């Protein structure tokens, strides 16, 4: 009996202890769902060359990023906001990339471009039918993000005077907005330029297309920086990762993945 | 192992049982301590009956969410309860016992499917179907009700089958001996006798439907408005908490805890009712 217990105990503890790798440093990034896929890619590349670091990337939205960095739940917060709010003043912010916000509709939608005023009216609920902005006779389904989203805050801050209509569908990440607009012929939403694909169509805003060139050229209106926020003194590993993202290699990855480099 | 002995084992088991109970009590206390002060400071009437949910402006009216939870749950019951009870009756009374013994565990497997998978299927298959054939955005009360209705089927069927099987065979034999047909026996005698167990299963399923979060966030649309038709998009109480908890601070966070208190109380009441119904069944015998 005792021997059986001893064997069981030893095997269980060995099994549990095998999870402890040789003093690996772990840290977590949390926040912007716009930057999340790119952060994951950069983390993968960084971990491939730095075996002693373990990086986890979570989403949740820019406000979650700021809260997590402040509370310590995450070591690095990701926020894609035009201006950082009051509470983020206590954090050190580094711009690692820039991103455009594309206004997207379903590929089946005839509309090719919208003015800022039209966008404002659609998201306020004043314009309710696609025919009022040059599309088919169909009701507009407005899709937006939850209140803590950096993409939403930036969008509403740049377009100005938006009180989101009560009929708007709310989705919780850039990815789910893309899916919703891709599945609904009458939907309109907004998401990060880096998340565009052929399932949705970006419309021109005030005559400008949402491409890397027009964003870099300063012509496209909806642009915001992506911040990495750290509380207090950044540890060696965290600084190493942020420096990697800002390095030529990291910025090249950002560029080829569809985002805009920081400079 | 005489070291521990009888008294020791009893103490250990008592400790383990109490730890489970105390975990529940601690959770309840925590939610109440965060949520109740807010409810009384903000005003119960304003909280429960106002339609303005604008945390940035300090307005915390959860009425649209309460109505949404009610509609979605009632819809789920309308779909899940009849299908579930009918399924249970069919499996116990109209099909060989061997078939039931194979089908029942298979249906119970449905209960093991994660709710996010249900939500996924709802988004990819159900919402486009509703949008194409019935109109509206597709992500709606109807989508939520259908997905929830299917999710609660295992609960209803499983417990109803157990209740119907618990009806003494003598009831059925007596009814048939008096000349009733199988169907007459089923709906006038057997189901009536199993009634309290079936009602208990429905109430428990209702508790599950009200508490469901992930599937509802994915298929109900999350618009903060009072629905006027099953094709409108809605946000339930659970979805509201899940969407905003990550970044809520201060009063906003307390308001979400208060929403949690409301949910907690509703589900507690439903469980107590279910318990009473089950006790009535045992008492009847």
Image: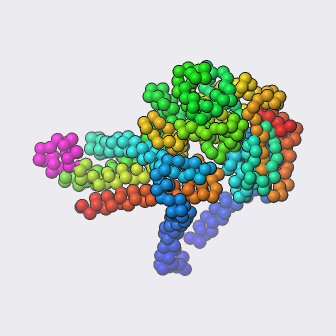
**Is residue A183 shown above or below B207?**
above
**Colour mode of the rendering:** rainbow
Which quadrant would the C terminus of chain B be assigned to in this image? bottom left
**x and y percent of residue A144 in the render?**
61, 37
Q: Identify the residue at horizontal 72%, vertical 51% (top origin).
A: A66
Secondary structure mostly taken by the magenta-highlighted segment of the chain: helix
Q: Is residue A151 visible?
A: no
Answer with the quarter of the image where residue B88 lies.
top left
Q: Is residue B243 visible?
A: yes
Q: How many marks?
A: 0
Q: Identify the residue at horizontal 61%, vertical 31% (top origin).
A: A121
**Is residue A142 shown above or below A233?**
above
**x and y percent of residue B89 in the render?**
29, 44
Please state which of residues B40 and B241 is positioned toward the viewer in this rendering. Answer: B40
Please state which of residues B160 and B64 is positioned toward the viewer in this rendering. Answer: B64
Asked whether, in this view, residue B245 is left or right of residue B136, the answer is: right
**x and y percent of residue A15 in the render?**
67, 58
**Hey, which residue is sitting farthest left in the picture?**
B178
Which quadrant would the N terminus of chain B be assigned to in this image? bottom right
Q: Which residues are magenta?
A: B172-190
Q: Identify the residue at horizontal 86%, vertical 46% (top origin).
A: A243
Tell whether position B187 is magenta: yes
Please state which of residues A170 and A199 is positioned toward the viewer in this rendering. Answer: A170
Q: Identify the residue at horizontal 44%, vertical 46% (top origin).
A: B67
**x and y percent of residue B194 in the render?**
27, 52
**Is residue B125 shown above or below A234?**
above
Asked whether, in this view, residue B157 is left or right of residue B2, the answer is: left
Tell whether position B171 is magenta: no
């Amino acid at each position: 009996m005792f021997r059986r217990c001893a064997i069981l105990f030893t095997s269980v503890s060995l099994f549990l202890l095998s999870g402890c790798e040789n003093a690996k440093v772990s840290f977590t990034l949390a926040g912007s769902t716009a930057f999340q896929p790119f952060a994951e890619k950069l983390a993968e590349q960084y971990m491939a060359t730095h075996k002693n670091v373990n990086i986890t990337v979570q989403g949740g939205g820019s406000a979650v990023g700021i809260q997590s960095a402040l509370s310590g739940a995450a070591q690095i917060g990701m926020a894609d906001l035009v201006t950082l709010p009051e509470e983020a003043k206590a954090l050190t912010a580094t711009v690692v990339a820039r991103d455009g916000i594309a206004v997207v509709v379903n590929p089946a939608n005839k509309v090719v471009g919208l003015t800022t005023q039209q966008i404002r009216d659609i998201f306020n609920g004043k314009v309710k039918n696609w025919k009022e902005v040059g599309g088919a006779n169909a009701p507009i389904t407005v899709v937006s993000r939850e209140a803590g989203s950096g993409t939403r805050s930036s969008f509403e801050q740049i377009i100005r005077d938006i009180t989101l209509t009560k009929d708007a569908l709310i989705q919780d990440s850039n990815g789910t907005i893309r899916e919703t607009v891709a599945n609904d012929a009458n939907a309109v939403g907004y998401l990060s330029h880096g998340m565009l694909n052929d399932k949705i169509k970006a419309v021109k805003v005030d005559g400008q297309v949402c491409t890397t060139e027009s964003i870099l050229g300063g012509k496209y209106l909806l642009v915001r920086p992506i911040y990495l926020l750290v509380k207090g003194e950044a540890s060696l590993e965290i600084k190493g990762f942020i420096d990697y993202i800002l390095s030529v290699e990291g910025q090249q990855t950002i560029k080829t993945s569809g985002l805009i480099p920081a400079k | 192992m005489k070291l521990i002995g009888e008294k020791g084992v009893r103490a250990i088991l008592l400790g383990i049982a109490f730890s489970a109970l105390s975990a529940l009590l601690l959770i309840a206390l925590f939610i109440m301590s965060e949520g109740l002060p807010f409810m009384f400071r903000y005003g119960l009437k304003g909280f429960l009956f106002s339609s303005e949910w604008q945390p940035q402006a300090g307005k915390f009216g959860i009425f649209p969410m309460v109505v949404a939870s009610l509609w979605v749950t009632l819809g789920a019951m309308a779909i899940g309860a009849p299908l579930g009870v009918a399924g249970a009756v069919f499996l116990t009374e109209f099909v060989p016992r061997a078939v039931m013994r194979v089908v029942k565990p298979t249906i119970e497997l449905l209960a093991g499917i994660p709710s996010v998978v249900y939500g996924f299927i709802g988004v990819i298959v159900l919402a486009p179907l509703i949008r194409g054939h019935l109109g509206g955005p597709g992500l709606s009360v109807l989508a939520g009700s259908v997905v929830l209705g299917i999710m609660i089927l295992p609960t209803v069927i499983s417990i109803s089958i157990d209740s119907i099987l618990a009806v003494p065979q003598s009831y059925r034999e007596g009814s048939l001996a008096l000349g009733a047909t199988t169907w007459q026996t089923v709906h006038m005698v057997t189901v009536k006798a199993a009634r309290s167990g079936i009602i208990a299963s429905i109430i428990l399923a209702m508790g599950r439907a009200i508490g469901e979060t992930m599937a509802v966030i994915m298929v109900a649309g999350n618009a903060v408005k009072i629905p006027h038709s099953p094709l409108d998009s809605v946000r339930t109480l659970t979805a509201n908490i899940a969407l905003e908890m990550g970044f809520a601070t201060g009063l906003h966070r307390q308001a979400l805890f208060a929403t949690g208190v409301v949910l907690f109380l509703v589900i507690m009441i439903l469980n107590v009712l279910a318990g009473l119904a089950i006790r009535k069944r045992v008492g009847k015998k």
